[in-house]
Amino acid sequence: MLVNAHVWGVNAYGAPVWHLRRHDSGKVFGTYAQSFDAVWATATPVREE
């Protein structure tokens, strides 16, 4: 998973990007995955005009 870390005063294109991999003893990947899934669950299709 690629995570774009938001840094105060830095545009997204200039902020660091972390490459995360799932690891049995870690929780960081799962935390970001749950966050993504929660946001995705609230998404709605873009309305065509």
Image (cartoon, rainbow, N blue to C red):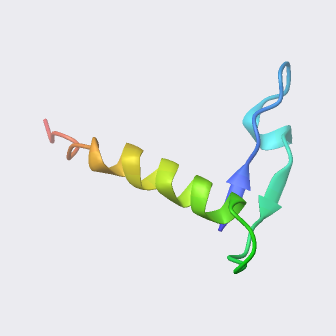
Which residue is painted at 70% across and 55% down in the image? 3
| Residue 45 position within the rendered picture, expressed as x and y whole percent measured from the top left | 20, 47
Numbered-mark total: 0
Frontmost residue, 15 versus 24? 24
Residue 4: x %, y % from top left? 72, 48
**For this view, does 49 lie left or right of residue 1?**
left
State the residue lying farthest toward the top: 9
Q: Is residue 44 left or right of residue 13?
A: left
Taking the image as shown, residue 15 lies to the left or right of residue 20, namely right
In this rendered view, identify the residue nearer to me: 8 or 30: 30
Q: Residue furthest front?
A: 25
Q: Quadrant of residue 46?
A: top left
The residue closer to the viewer here, 10 or 26, is 26
Q: Is residue 42 left or right of residue 1?
A: left
x and y percentages locating residue 24 in the rendered image:
70, 80
Quadrant where the N terminus is found in the figure: bottom right
Of the 4 image quadrants, the one containing the C terminus is top left
Q: Residue at x 48, y 55 (%)?
A: 34
Which quarter of the picture shows residue 2? Answer: bottom right
Residue visible at 75% across and 34% down in the picture: 6
Residue 13 lies in quadrant: top right
On screen, residue 7 above or below 14? above
Q: Residue furthest bottom?
A: 24
